[in-house]
Image: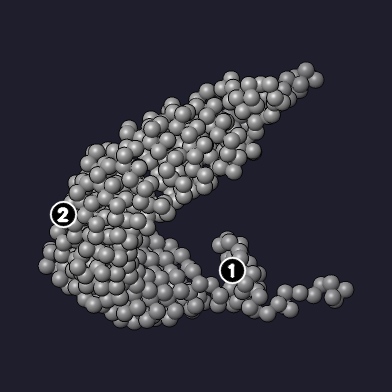
Amino acid sequence: GESTNADLTLLLPDECLATIFSKLGCEDRNASSLACRRWKAVESKCRQRLILRARSDLSPFLPHLLLRFENVSILALKCSRKLISLDDRALARIASGLPRLKKLKLKGCVEITDDGLRSFSLSCSPSLKKFSCGSCGFGVRGLNWIVSNCKGLEDLSVKRLRKLDLQPQSHAATMEVENGLQRLCLKDLHNGQLFSPLIRSSKRLRTLIVCRSAGDWDRIFEETADALTELTELQIDNVQLGDWGLSAVSKCRSLEVLFISRATDCTDAGISAVANGCRKLRKIHLDGCKFNRIGDNGLASIAAKCLDLQEILLMGVAVSAAGLNSLAENCRNLERMALCNTDSVGDAEMLCVAEKFGALRKLCVKNCPITDSGIEVIGWGCPNLIKLKVKRCRSVTKASICWLKLHRRGLVVSMDAGSMTGGREEEAAAQEGVDGGGHGRSRRVTSSATHLVCGSKGTMVLRSKLSSAASVLLVKRGSGSSSTSHTAHR
């Protein structure tokens, strides 16, 4: 009897119990920690990540939380901008209460000021490597304290700091301090040029992401490109950038990944300059925004200079078979390619892809005027292709997909329902063609044998709505039949 009622978890060492806690989800872990004092103590010591609603009413409980979770290394403080958040005093307590803190994220903490960041930076853990903030109440001075005093900081992400709008350009000079930043992310900033001195002083910067941030980025890159000798990844989205800025980017000889999206002033000349200077490029994403300023000439320059290219995505780029030919002849290791939102990609371009790109493993075609013929030539070519994604190509019918999945059974095909037209007649025709005009034995085509994956969110929503409607209808029918039988019984 005693052996049956004994608590066998007492035989588990704390290390095993901590491993079990690490496998649980957030809710299960929180509930399990309240089972007994030992479980609570073990769970508190092994917890590494903590997310708190950073409202002002949390301040009285903050000392107890920090005492309980003293080993936390990743902390996120999130608060709605409509509520009063934690203030500078609470942030100072966090700095002294978490000696192993490595990553800190602040979101909506409008009560934290520049002085609060100064106090935090002076007493925070020397192991702090990442600082992320969004929609907070501090500005350039506070960020300057973080960069200057946190010597181990490697990753800085800044998003939607409205206080920057009111600060003059003279405050930017304070950002030019020696630092060890390796990654810098700037998003949704109305005064992005304030960070030009910081970029210039970040000699070890490897990744730079600039998204929806106002400023003359041509001039910024002209001022900073010479210092970015170790930059390997550059992502630019919806900023004021043209060929002048791209010419400056071409000085970054170590660049391997380049994403350019919605930069309307970029042309073939700028792309050619980047290709000529950055010959180590492995990944290129170009979104031409349908302005037709980037085409075969830019693609030919990429093909001639970037011989190690492995991935290329072209959206709104006026590329034709000539540009694809030059790409296939020079970039022998190209494994992933996407052609999207362009009227210049048709069946002729698909034939070029099928015949010339022998190393291609993944292909995406979206919103292009290809037909069933283009799908069929892909089925006969691209021997190493393992995944094909076709979306919003209205001239592609279900028959070609059925034909493709029968000929390339190992190929995973992802196609949205909006692109698929045709019905059972076309599917039967495709099956008949495979079986030799119907003289052989017939085989049933099933979706499980085709690896066909539907990637349309609209289809999923429609399916869920239809399922809900069917459930409601069944409930109504059931209640109606039961009421009818009850009336008949009466």
Q: Residue at x 27, y 65 (%)?
A: 253
Q: Quadrant of residue 144?
A: bottom left
Which tag is nearer the camera, tag 2 or tag 1?
Answer: 2
> How far is the residue under mark 2 from the one under mark 1?
51 Å
Residue 68 visible in rendering: yes
| Residue 33 spot, x, y in % from top left | 61, 70
| Residue 420 spot, x, y in % from top left | 50, 29
The amino acid pointed to by label 2 is Trp
| Residue 392 spot, x, y in % from top left | 42, 33
Question: Which of the pair 260/331 is nearer the observer?
Answer: 331
For residue 481, above or below residue 78? above
For residue 382, above or below residue 123? above
Q: Secondary structure at mark 1?
A: helix
Q: Quadrant of residue 294?
A: top left
Residue corresponding to mark 2: 244
Residue corresponding to mark 1: 22
